Amino acid sequence: MPPKAAPVVIDLKFNPDEVTAALADAFPGRDVVNRADPAQAGRDLAQARYAVVWKSQPDLFARAPNLAAVFSGGAGVDHVLTLPGLPDVPLVRFVDPTLTTRMSEWVVLQCLLHLRQHGRYAGQAQRGAWAELPQPEARDLTVGVMGLGVLGQDAARKLQTLGFTVTGWSRRKKTLDGIETYDERGLDAFLARTDILVGLLPLTAETRGLYDATLFAKLSRKGPFGAPVFINAGRGGSQVEADIIAALRSGGLHGASLDVFSTEPLEADSPLWTLPNCIVTPHAAAASDVKALFRHVEAQIERHEAGLPFEHLVDRTAGY
Ligand code: NDP
Ligand code: OXD
């Protein structure tokens, strides 16, 4: 008899129907426990070797004490690193073209909406006002991407293709064709030339509360709209929402696009919902495609069981 394939536990706070549908063809030959399925709630997890998690139930690691690896259901891992009892095993994050493409689409869309003053045209259309606005070109604006990882680099390249002047900032300096890059010591120089700031940073001790009034004050005021635009799809914990609201009201920021918030869902009474030139999306910039996620986890398990190292490992000390 062949040895039994190591079992997998799925603990994903995703759309349960999508998870069930994706599991129909995933993990062939393996016992899989889907914790979102009420019929499986009482199943023993003691033998589980791999866990796939997104905002999982707090008793997961107490009930599954024999894990060899934990897989994040998304690119970010801040939700995993704070889970009670997280074992000291490899933590693998989700990296996949489906996710990267979705994020770049969102970032490009937001930059274009602000460039082409879509909010003002939408307001004019509601009043039946026919009035053409000035049309700066993409090359007249510098988009500064904070976080030049998998997502930041792809977004930067796609923005560059559209004609934007693109710069980037990351902890360690990157070399990207045609894109001026800065390391963490170059933050002020990077900000001083940024007309549209795009946040694609993970939430860590260093990035918590980073996007605040002090940082906004360092952004360029020389762009075609005078004040800069702030776009964030990294994590809400990196932004100080009171400062964003104050800057949008005072004209310190020309506009904003926010996909992530310090509290999600965003509170119903947050002024961010209704401030002019503030675009809110519900943490939907780049959802994980569940089928692609399971394919990625299967591929990583195969590597591991063949004696190869996992890819996309998280550095727990750095927090991403
Ligand atoms: P990566 O780990 O590939 O990239 C992270 C980047 O941030 C790296 O360039 C890293 O620098 C930089 N960075 C981290 N800490 C610092 C710091 N203290 N100072 C300067 N730079 C720093 O992550 P991804 O690109 O895959 O994802 C980024 C984030 O996007 C995720 O962590 C998640 O929070 C968010 N996300 C949001 C989604 C949404 O739908 N809103 C969907 C998916 C992800 P270095 O290169 O030097 O290591
Ligand atoms: C992620 C997310 O981290 O969707 O993948 O936020």
Image: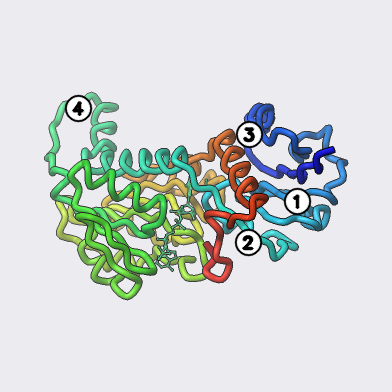
- Residue at mark 3: 15
Mark 2 closeness class: few <14, some 14–19, many ≥20 residues within 10 Å: some
Q: Earlier in the sequence, mark 1 or mark 2?
A: 1
- Mark 1 in CB contact with mark 3 (< 8 angstroms): no
Q: CA distance from mark 1 to mark 4?
A: 62 Å
- Mark 2 in CB contact with mark 4 (< 8 angstroms): no
Q: CA distance from mark 2 to mark 3?
A: 22 Å
Q: Residue at x 57, y 58 (%)?
A: 78
Residue 248, by quadrant, is: bottom left
Asked whether the viewer can see residue 276, the reply is no
Q: Residue at x 56, y 52 (%)?
A: 93
- Residue at mark 1: 49
Q: CA distance from mark 2 to mark 4?
A: 51 Å
The amino acid type of the residue labelled 3 equals Asn
- Residue at mark 4: 129
Name the residue at the top extreme.
Answer: 128
Q: Nearer the viewer, residue 161 or 83?
A: 161
The amino acid type of the residue labelled 1 equals Arg
Please tell me whether mark 1 sits on a helix, a strand or a loop: loop
Beta carbon of the mark 2 residue lies under 8 A of ligand 1: no
- Residue at mark 2: 81
Q: CA distance from mark 1 to mark 3?
A: 24 Å
Q: Earlier in the sequence, mark 2 or mark 3?
A: 3
